Image (cartoon, rainbow, N blue to C red):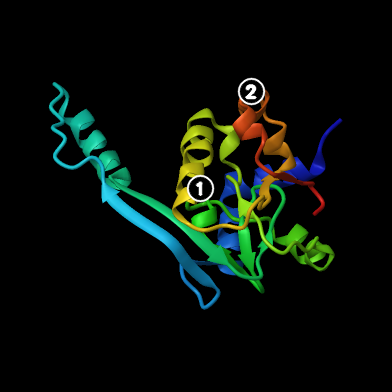
Amino acid sequence: MFDIKRIFRAVLWRTGLGELIAKSFWKKVETDDDIVFLYKNSKYVFNKISIRFDFPEYNGYLLEDTNKWAKQEEFVLLVKDAFVEPERGIAIKYPNKVILQTTIIDSQFPYILPYLLNRYNAVKIDSAVLYDGYATKNYYHHLLNGVNSIHMLEKVDLPNNIPFLITRSCFEHKYFQYLYRRSGKFRGLNWLVQEPDE
């Protein structure tokens, strides 16, 4: 059976029309009156790395990519009154502001129609840590953006037993479940699974 929604989304993104529409609707923000950095640190981790392969084109590619990812940032944000869309775990400030730090790549946006139709049915919670959004579906990002970022929470004062919000699809993903089944400390966090319609 064909999944019309999935086919429609694929056509929109492969033609570039979906990204064009998303960029015209959503506004990505790093700062706002309701966004406070509780902790922030950045450093350049690839400084002065010598790239000397026999192929100049490859050296150029590596240098460009290294410069793109050289600045590594650690942060803990406090965002007041935000929606978290359930597919990718992206934080949204009403009416159309996407919190940049909750996206993994520049072209990542929430789907507009589900947001417009479902935002009035949002489940309200007092506070939560947005665990990783969409990262767990990729092994590298699961470790770097998800698991590795938990240590930053030790640098701020959070309420005891604060929920860790994770989307249903990421919670059920094999990378998350592998660690969840094998680590009592990881499993012992207060996981709050966000269902696809929440």
In the rendered image, residue 22, in percent from the top left (x then y), is placed at 60, 61
Q: Quadrant of the C terminus?
A: bottom right
Q: Nearer the viewer, residue 108 or 3?
A: 108
In the rendered image, residue 126, in percent from the top left (x then y), is placed at 72, 64
Q: Is residue 169 above or below residue 126?
A: above
Q: Pointer 2: residues within 10 angstroms few (<14), some, or many (20+)?
A: few
Q: How many marks?
A: 2
In the rendered image, residue 174, in percent from the top left (x then y), is placed at 66, 25
The residue positioned 50% from the left and 61% from the top of the image is 77
Marks 1 and 2, how far apart in space? 22 Å
The residue positioned 27% from the left and 40% from the top of the image is 66
The residue positioned 63% from the left and 23% from the top of the image is 178
Residue 104's label in the rendered image is 1
Tell me if 5 is positioned left or right of 106 in this view: right
* First reached walking from the N terminus: tag 1 or tag 2: 1
- Nearer the observer: mark 1 or 2; the answer is 2
Looking at this view, name the residue that lies furthest to the right: 1
Q: Nearer the viewer, residue 197 or 123?
A: 123
Numbered disc 1: secondary structure: loop
Q: Nearer the viewer, residue 183 or 73?
A: 183
Tell me if 153 is positioned left or right of 191 in this view: left
Say what amino acid the circle numbered 2 marks. Tyr
Say what amino acid the circle numbered 1 marks. Ile
Tell me if 22 is positioned left or right of 190 in this view: left
Residue placed under numbered mark 2 in the picture: 178
Looking at this view, name the residue that lies furthest to the front: 160
Tell me if 100 is positioned left or right of 63 in this view: right
Q: Pointer 1: residues within 10 angstroms few (<14), some, or many (20+)?
A: some
Numbered disc 2: secondary structure: helix
Q: Quadrant of the N terminus?
A: top right
Residue 111, picture quadrant: bottom right
Residue 189, picture quadrant: top right
